């Protein structure tokens, strides 16, 4: 019975952690997508993740939203004019940490001292933000045909990756 309880708790924790990532939805307090129309066929599209979203997931959600928006505008293709994704995502930060010293005495009278320090380069918890400026068109861009993305094809190929 004890092992069943441990398995249940472990699975619950995994499900809880997986549920913490921002899912694909319009922006709210915990993240999501948004867009801003710059001119007739040009939009700035953003997807804000959180510390549980990896960069690939944010980029996929962002491109998926660009595809949906293109189809909503009655167009078929889009071209990424500018990629300002992850500009504010630091990798590591050098911090002054604390020094923790633990001393333990065992039942046999032995003493064990451990020193822990968080001094040095530390991982920084960050919320990845993907941002594209896209230009939408009916058909591929003649000047950049291989860089033009077919919105419907992207949605069909990546629908299985989108967590709603």
Image (cartoon, grey):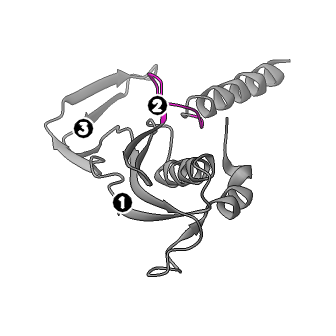
| Viewer-nearest residue: 156 or 18 | 156
- Taking the magenta stretch, the answer to whether it contains residue 101 is no
Quarter of the figure that contains the N terminus = top right
Residue in the picture at 27% in, 35% down: 116
Q: Are marks 3 and 2 in contact (CB under 8 Å)?
A: no
| Viewer-nearest residue: 37 or 122 | 37
Which residue is disc 1 drawn over?
83
- Taking the magenta stretch, the answer to whether it contains residue 31 is yes
Residue in the picture at 46% in, 79% down: 144
Label 2 neighbourhood size at 10 Å, few (<14), some (14-19), many (20+)? many
Which residue is disc 2 drawn over?
31
Which residue is disc 3 drawn over?
118
**Callout in the foreground (1, 2):** 1
Residue in the picture at 35% in, 39% down: 126
Q: In the displayed structure, would residue 19 be above or below residue 40?
A: above
Quarter of the figure that contains the C terminus = top right
Q: Position of residue 156 (x, y in %)?
A: 74, 58
Question: Which stretch did the figure color magenta?
Answer: 23-33
């Amino acid at each position: 019975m004890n092992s069943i309880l441990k398995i249940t708790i472990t699975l619950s924790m995994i499900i809880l952690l997986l549920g913490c990532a921002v899912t694909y939805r319009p922006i709210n307090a915990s993240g999501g997508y948004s867009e801003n129309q710059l001119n007739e066929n040009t939009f700035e599209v953003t997807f804000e993740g959180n510390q549980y979203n990896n960069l690939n997931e944010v980029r996929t959600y962002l491109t998926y939203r660009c595809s949906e928006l293109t189809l909503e505008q009655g167009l078929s293709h889009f071209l990424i004019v500018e990629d300002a994704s992850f500009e504010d995502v630091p990798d590591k930060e050098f911090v002054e940490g604390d020094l923790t010293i633990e001393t333990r005495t065992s039942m046999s009278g032995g003493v064990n001292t451990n020193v822990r320090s968080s001094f040095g380069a530390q991982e920084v918890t960050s919320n990845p933000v993907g941002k594209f400026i896209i230009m939408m068109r009916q058909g591929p861009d003649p000047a950049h045909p291989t860089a033009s993305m077919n919105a419907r094809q992207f949605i069909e190929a990546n629908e299985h990756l989108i967590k709603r």
